[in-house]
Amino acid sequence: YDLIVVDELGYLPMSRQSNHNLFQLIHAMYEFRSIILTTNKDFTRWGDFFIDENVAVPIVDRLIHHAQIFMLGGESYRLRQKLGGGSGVGVGQN
């Protein structure tokens, strides 16, 4: 079973070539493979980091067609740890 994980999409700006490559990857996997994607951007803001909404719209369209979308909120565990309010134990830590 093939799966791709894209973590923090939109954290850094993407070049036109990167946009093209991501679209090609998502298009190739669409309806055949699974994609897990994390981002802190609403779908309505994807045009900002994709430079062009003409690229963002078909990517979002393919991603959400059969998707289960989980909207998570809350404070950052990293910030909480930095401010001394957390245990420092998180996912993957012992």
Image (cartoon, rainbow, N blue to C red):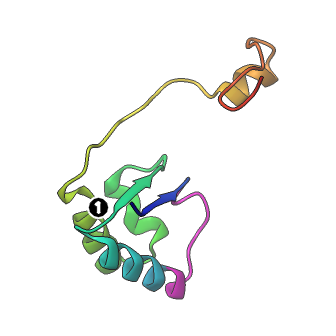
Which residue occupies the foreground of this view, 78 or 7?
Answer: 7
Tell me which corner region of the image, top left, top right, bottom left or bottom right, holds residue 1. Answer: bottom left
Name the residue: 65% across, 29% down: 91
Residue 51's place in the image compared with 91, above or below, is: below
Percent position (x, y) of residue 21? 47, 83
- Amino acid carrying label 1: it is Leu
Q: In the depicted view, which residue is nearer to us: 36 or 44?
A: 36
Q: Which residue is mark 1?
A: 63
Magenta region includes residue 15: yes
Residue 5 lies left or right of residue 94; in this view the side is left
Find the residue positioned furthest to the left: 65
Q: Percent position (x, y) of residue 34? A: 35, 59
Q: Residue at x 19, y 55 (%)?
A: 66
Indicate yes or no whether the magenta region holds residue 27.
no
Q: Total marks drawn? A: 1
* Residue lying at 42% horizontally and 53% vertically, measured from the top left: 36
Q: Which residues are magenta?
A: 9-18
State left or right for residue 22 relative to residue 12.
left
93 on left or right of 50: right
Query: Which quadrant would the C terminus be assigned to in this image?
Result: top right
Out of 43 and 27, give the one closest to the viewer. Answer: 27
In percent of width and height, residue 93 lies at 75, 28
Q: Residues within 10 Å of mark 1 (few under 14, many from 20)?
A: many
Q: Is residue 93 above or below residue 59?
A: above
In the image, what residue occupies the spot 26% across and 44% down?
Answer: 68
Residue 53 falls in image quadrant: bottom left
In the image, residue 45 lies at what x, y percent? 38, 58
Is 88 placed above or below 12 here? above
> Mainly helix, strand or loop, the magenta region?
loop
Q: Quadrant of residue 31?
A: bottom left
Res. 53 in view = no
